[in-house]
Amino acid sequence: MGIFSGVMTSQVGLHCMSQSLFNALIFNQYVLRARYETFDEYWHANTEHPDRPTEKISQFFSACSLQFPGDTLLLGQLSEASLELEKYWLNRYGIGEISFDLFKIVLQLTGQYSPQGELKNKDINTIESVHPQTQLRVLQCLDDLRCYEDLVGTKKLFMVTKKNKIDCFAGDLYEGMVSQFHYSGSLLKVYEEDAFLVGQDLIWCRWSLHHNQTGFTDIWLVTIEDNRAQVQKMVKQTSEDTYNLEDTQRWVEMDEEMKLAIAKTQHCAIDNANNFCATPPYVQMLNLLQREG
């Protein structure tokens, strides 16, 4: 927090808070989110800091805004940005341990690089001038966050273990909402809650194939587009307690049963989207894998 406090001190007396300091306030506070189960608990909890008294997040933001009395938008934007960051991060990556590991890396990069990926000047007094459009600070903060996310992979700072991938892709299959079909002489299950609509045309889903001959079950991560299904990843069961993760791209052979399975998945995906269904954990894991080095 030393550098952070120095940046704050260097800007006291300015008419408006700069974008860099605004980002730093939001990102530095959000790293505390991992301690709490819900955003409401995080927002109202008393948090301890080594260099200032115990306070709630809202109290901290209020104290910061008092240092910029001419910045009438600041306090409301700090609260808004915190909530928008929560909605974005929760929807995209979830709130698990791996998700917050990624956020800690993002926070590390914000102290070293500009959003454009350029090394920052180590002199905190050369902080950039006030953002010319302070009414856009919240949107700019989220845009900058996405730039830092992209930067994570280029620096090869983030990896997910094979076990974490398998556990996420094959875990928490809800058998209460399943449609059954047949494929290549085996039982194919469509997990209805896991059908997820991306945009207007692309659907992600989880299917499982129970091999009648071996008794083993493979979990498929499938995309459906233009009424065709393609397996993107597979958790393949090789023994009673052994599973392997295969990155594979292969089309599913079409027959009448497969057409029914695709139609059912499409219907479920639309229903889930209309009911504001949250992003499934397996899709959040796919998003995390995009950040791997």
Image: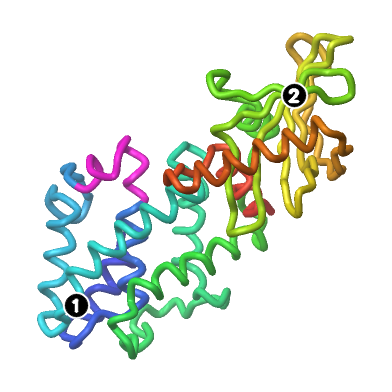
Residue 38: within the magenta? yes
Residue 138, relative to residue 208: is it above or below?
A: below
| Disc nearest the viewer among 1 and 2 | 2
Mark 2, other Cα within 10 Å: few <14 / some 14–19 / many ≥20: some
For marks 1 and 2, give the CA distance. 56 Å
Nearer to me, 83 or 121: 83
**Magenta span: chief secondary structure:** helix
Q: Earlier in the sequence, mark 1 or mark 2?
A: 1
Residue 232: within the magenta? no
Mark 1, other Cα within 10 Å: few <14 / some 14–19 / many ≥20: some
Residue at point 16%, 59% (across, down): 60
Check disc 1 and give the amino acid type: Leu
Residue at point 12%, 57% (across, down): 59
Position of residue 24 in the picture relative to residue 103 (left or right): left
The segment highlighted magenta reads 31-43
Please identify the quadrant where the C terminus is shown.
Answer: bottom right
Position of residue 202 in the picture relative to residue 272 (left or right): right
Position of residue 281 in the picture relative to residue 214 (left or right): left
Q: What label sits on residue 181 in the rendered view? A: 2
Nearer to me, 104 or 193: 193
Residue 186 location in percent, x, y? Answer: 83, 18
Nearer to me, 216 or 48: 216
Residue that carries the numbered disc 1 in the rendered image: 73
